[in-house]
Image (cartoon, helix red, strand yellow):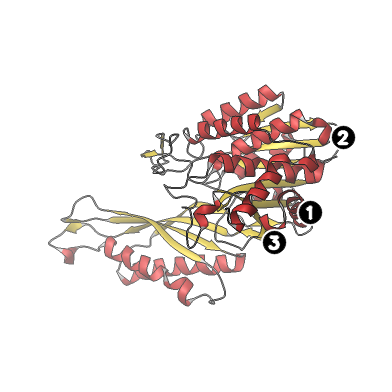
């Protein structure tokens, strides 16, 4: 006997594998091909800006479908699927992986490596699920091509590189994206999340926060470890900075204002008996609005400078690593997509998304030309994993392992439903 939750999931999955209202069926052959494409991509991730094989594969699949295509932003690929008169809709799928050593135990686990900007060789994993995004959008394009009588208009397929480093969307725009491709009326995008299969989550208004990453270089004076009086110890100094930075959210912001300050890396020294002359650490900041962003970033500058002065050290150097825009779902179009999801998936499968502290650069694609955006999360995990206090490992974890079939079923269907809410006949 199945539990009510399992029955609910079965009902949702039945709805989204038929899509009768749209006249497009996601049959077993198409689904199996999509799963094979996803597992192929999962085993071959590439770092931001290095998505050469991924881009070539996307181009090959678009050629097979007869979809016109072009390169934009280096490793970005744009497909233009035309089907007569009608609106133009853009759909973004990001393509890059992360420097993570995969630990999922999947038979198609990644053993790929890549080179970081500093020349370091690193393991690479699709630890954020961009492989699901690519496979879902390519399969949605396949189904739209095969069922042209069900829709009319133009779909601009945006396979965007470099989302993890916040340069990909901007690079495509700066490379003339909207001069080369048809101007859309809306930009759609989705992201796989640690949620039950057959569900989607979205909201009007902010869907992701602003994010800024800085590299801070602290300079001291080198000396022998036995002669600390001759040194200005940058490790001790930088450590005080790291601790003090944690007081910004706790003591300089209202408890009602969400923000995060994370120190993600810390490097200093080469030998235990040498006090080095530099220490370098990186900071990642998440804030909900421009005012809070400026408050936090100004506080970081003040604290770093003041701690250095207190230790008689030179002024530290602050370098920007990346900066993400805020992602805002259009208030007039998000209800339209939400209603389409409810019709396709069922009321219980469509949830109101809470504002998390994640970041996204998809907003740049539409903001660059004053076009609205609608972005949502979709589930790709067996509902049993959420029983009790259970929760699958989330994005950016080495154990992040969406169920291939669930990911493809939900991701493809959500993409089709959203596109057809604007182009469906």
Percent x, y of residue 155: 75, 37
Of the two numbered discs 3 and 2 on the same chain, state the one appearing first in sequence. Answer: 2
Quadrant of the rendered structure where residue 178 is?
top right
Cβ–Cβ under 8 Å for marks 3 and 2: no
**Along the line of sight, the residue nearer the viewer: 239 or 338:** 338
Percent x, y of residue 302: 44, 69
**Along the line of sight, the residue nearer the viewer: 138 or 243:** 138
For residue 276, above or below residue 232: above
Crowding near the residue tagged with mark 1, few <14, some 14–19, many ≥20 C-alpha atoms within 10 Å: some
Measuring 52% from the left and 53% from the top, which residue is drawn there? 384
Crowding near the residue tagged with mark 2, few <14, some 14–19, many ≥20 C-alpha atoms within 10 Å: few
Q: Secondary structure at mark 1?
A: helix
**Mark 2 and mark 1: span between their CA atoms?**
21 Å
Query: Residue 184, can we see it?
Result: no
Q: Which residue is mark 3?
A: 205
For residue 77, above or below residue 269: above
Measuring 79% from the left and 46% from the top, which residue is drawn there? 421
Crowding near the residue tagged with mark 3, few <14, some 14–19, many ≥20 C-alpha atoms within 10 Å: some
Of the two numbered discs 2 and 1 on the same chain, state the one appearing first in sequence. Answer: 2
Q: Which residue is mark 1?
A: 336
The mark found on residue 85 in the picture is 2
Cβ–Cβ under 8 Å for marks 1 and 3: no
Q: Secondary structure at mark 2?
A: loop
Which image quarter holds the C terminus? top right
């Amino acid at each position: 006997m199945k539990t009510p939750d399992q029955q609910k999931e079965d009902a949702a999955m039945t709805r989204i594998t038929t899509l009768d209202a749209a006249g497009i069926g996601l049959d077993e052959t198409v689904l199996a091909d999509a799963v094979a494409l996803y597992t192929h991509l999962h085993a071959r991730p590439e770092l931001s800006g290095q998505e050469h094989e991924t881009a070539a594969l996307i181009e090959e699949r678009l050629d097979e479908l007869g979809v016109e295509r072009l390169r934009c932003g280096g490793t970005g690929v744009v497909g233009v699927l035309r089907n007569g008169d009608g609106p133009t809709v853009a759909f973004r799928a990001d393509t890059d992986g992360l420097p993570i050593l995969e630990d999922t135990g999947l038979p198609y686990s990644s053993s790929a490596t890549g080179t970081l900007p500093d020349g370091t060789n690193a393991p690479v994993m699709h630890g954020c699920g961009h492989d699901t995004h690519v496979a879902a959008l390519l399969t949605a394009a396949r189904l739209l091509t095969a069922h042209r009588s069900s829709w009319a208009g133009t779909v601009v397929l945006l396979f965007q590189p470099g989302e993890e480093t916040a340069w990909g969307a901007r690079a495509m725009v700066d490379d003339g994206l909207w001069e080369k491709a048809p101007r859309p009326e809306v930009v759609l995008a989705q992201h796989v999340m640690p949620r039950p299969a057959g569900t989607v989550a979205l909201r009007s208004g902010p869907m992701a926060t602003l994010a800024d990453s800085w590299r801070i270089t602290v300079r001291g004076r080198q000396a022998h470890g036995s002669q600390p009086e001759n040194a200005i110890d940058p490790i001790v100094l930088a450590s005080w900075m790291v601790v003090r930075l944690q007081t910004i959210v706790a003591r300089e912001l209202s408890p009602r204002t969400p923000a995060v300050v994370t120190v993600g890396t810390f490097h200093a020294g080469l030998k235990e008996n040498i006090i080095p002359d530099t220490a370098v650490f990186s900071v990642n900041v998440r804030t909900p609005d421009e005012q809070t962003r400026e408050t936090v970033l100004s506080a970081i500058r003040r604290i770093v400078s003041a701690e250095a002065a207190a230790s008689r050290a030179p002024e530290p150097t602050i370098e920007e690593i990346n900066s993400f825009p805020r992602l805002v779902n259009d208030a007039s179009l998000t209800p339209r997509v939400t209603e389409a999801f409810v019709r396709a998936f069922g009321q219980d499968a469509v949830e109101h998304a809470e504002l998390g502290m994640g970041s996204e650069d998809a907003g740049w694609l539409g903001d660059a030309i004053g076009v609205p955006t609608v972005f949502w999360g979709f589930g790709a995990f067996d509902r049993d994993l959420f029983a009790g206090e259970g929760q699958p490992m989330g994005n950016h974890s080495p154990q992040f392992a969406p169920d291939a079939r669930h990911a493809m079923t939900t991701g493809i269907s959500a993409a089709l439903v959203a596109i057809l809410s604007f182009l469906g006949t």
